[in-house]
Amino acid sequence: MELFAETKLVGDGYAGGFSCGMTMHGNQTMERFALKEGTETLEEGTGVYETPEGLRLTVKKTKDGDALRVQTSVENNTGAEVTLELLTSFALRRVGVKKIHRLQSFWSAEGKLRTETIEDLHLEPSWNRCGLRCEKFGNAGSMPVRKYFPFVALEDGEGKFVAVQLYHASTWQMELICKEDDTLTVLGGLGDRDFGQWMKKLAPGERFTAPDAVIAQGDSLLDVCDKLVKAQHPMISPVDDNMDILFNEYCTTWGNPSFDNLKKICDKLADKGIKFLVIDSGWYGSDAWWECVGDWEVNQKRFPGGMKPIADYIRSRGMIPGLWYEMEAVASGSKHYNDAAHLVKKDGVPLTVGGRRFWDMEDPWVVDYLSEKVIKLLKDAGYGYLKVDYNDTLGMGCDGAESMGEALRRKVVASQKFFEKIRKEIPGIVIENCSSGGHRLEPSMMQLCSQASFSDAHEIKSIPLIAANVQRVIRPEQSQIWAVLRAKDSKERIEYSLIATLFGRMCLSGDIYDLSEEQWDLVQKGMEFYVKASDIIKNGKTILHIYQESGYNSPKGQQLSVREWKGKRLAIMHRFENSKALLPEFPEGSKIIAEYGSGDGDFTAKAWLYEV
């Protein structure tokens, strides 16, 4: 297996084999490159390629834990301007592959494992090795986790795996290419001109760097996923480094928060081990708050005197207050909705998606405006937690650069810089990455935040499936999983919901002031179990995951996951329709430290914490 990268200049020819329009792999630009220094092995080092005209392609490989981080750049030393229409973050050649593993994702249905063979994807070489076979997939837009996560894992049929994760929050692509033999060439990075409307001009002496890619090799899918996840380096706030429990009031007030009902929630939650209380959407504008996104004027009817009094009250009850924003968007009822000068445009007019428009985050006026409306309000009112939502996508691209794809990339990078500005101006703030749940669960966004909404699947039965699947690609300590508690919930339902949060960070919501003492006792015991298991959740490695995927809407069978750290294990079992008990193996001499739940029928759950 060899590691390199590919690029292409506008004007150079494309490869044959019936591939034009399907892939830019093997183009005339690549034919002119020669390796000048370094090697193409999957080892630390730098490979440098040059063309006779002076175009330089550099592939820097750096060890990152048990993975390899790859940074690819192009430098124009030709003496004339050139235009790129392809630049990969990585390319792997001669990869032996029998199975391809991808993670699919739609709203409230994140992370579903899709496993296919070369034959399933129709990538077998032809009878005379003529013609290129290609599977190209990815995402176009500013919701990078839509349809697929930017991830692929390849299995050789002999117990060896290689997996790749891209660090890119806008249009990305991956390609699996079979041309002449039974191995594949695997490429990925920015969406190219064909897939993502991307071209980039480089002046003489200018350099452009592709998004990072991280590659891991191992003996199982669990192994390579663990190595990729542990190569992520999120900027987790020191205020949020202890796996603390939070409460979000959205599934309690359903978008109707007020000083009075939040005071009631605070009084119920005081002294129950909750660290953060997050006020979700509805604190601003009119009662039709979904139309007021962009103005960020406090709803004085709900919060007389602004947002500081309720923040002060939350702190007085021993919790850190949090506040929801969708700061990059402008909704149809906003006074800025027709302020075209400061909005993202496509074809010269504001880009409109489902009644939303988008701030141009490259515009200094917008940065100043949001600094006043977001950063200043949070600081002045004393909020220590910010939930950033993002509820639609810019799509294929926009105006503002030499190509729509490059303009899109720049707008998203500008958004990420605003996240950095928030962190700089409010030291210690806890930032939650949300995009209608999980549409931004990729590493370059995750490294800017402490936590992330794993999904908008707040109460459905498939929560433990989604939560376990998402654990393959983000750090569990960042994966905020909701347990929505209802007064009508049975003992089994409460346990089922709380045990699902053991795949990440526990977040509570729901009818907390209507729960009986018996129900609260169950919740309290679930929280105590979570605290005991939190070190394993945060630091451990998943060593067993059993579930044969069917659908998320009507899960059947049973799921068992086991995570290990420093001689302790956490086992999590959920039973679905037509299920049977799926118990962990307890090695001889094991000692059970704690148990929670029953797991004695359909839609029940049980968790074990034990020493081995």
Image: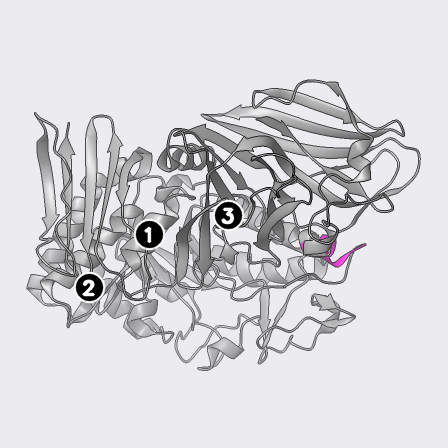
| Residue 183 painted magenta | no
- Helix, strand, or loop for circle 1? helix
Horizontally, residue 475 falls left or right of residue 355, namely left
Q: In the rendered structure, which segment of residues is drawn in magenta?
A: 402-408
State the CA–CA distance, disc 1 to disc 2: 28 Å
Which marked residue is nearer to the observer: mark 3 or mark 2? 3
Check disc 3 and give the amino acid type: Glu
Image spot of residue 97 (x, y percent): 50, 36
Q: Which three-letter amino acid code belongs to the residue tagged 2?
A: Lys
> Dot 2 corresponds to which residue?
268
Question: Which badge, 3 or 2, comes first in the chain's sequence?
Answer: 2
Question: Which residue, as the protein is rendered here, is positioned at the far right?
Answer: 79
Q: Could you say which quadrant of the image residue 213 lies in?
A: top right
Mark number for residue 442? 3
Residue toward you, 554 or 408: 554
Q: 590 or 494, which is in the foreground?
A: 590
> Height in image: 368 above or below 590?
below
Task: Answer few, some or many: residues within 10 Å of disc 2's Cα (few below 14, many 20 plus, some between 14 and 19).
Answer: some
The rendered magenta stretch, by its main secondary structure, is classed as helix
**Residue at 63 percent of width and 43 percent of height:** 189
* Mark 3 element type: loop
Q: How many neighbours does mark 3 have within 10 angstroms: few (below 14), some (14-19), or many (20 or more)?
A: many
Q: Are marks 1 and 3 in contact (CB under 8 Å)?
A: no
Query: Which one is nearer the viewer's eye here, 294 or 4?
Result: 4
Residue 600 visible in rendering: yes
Distance CA(mark 1)–CA(mark 3):
15 Å
Q: Position of residue 273 (x, y in %)?
A: 21, 50
Residue corresponding to mark 1: 467
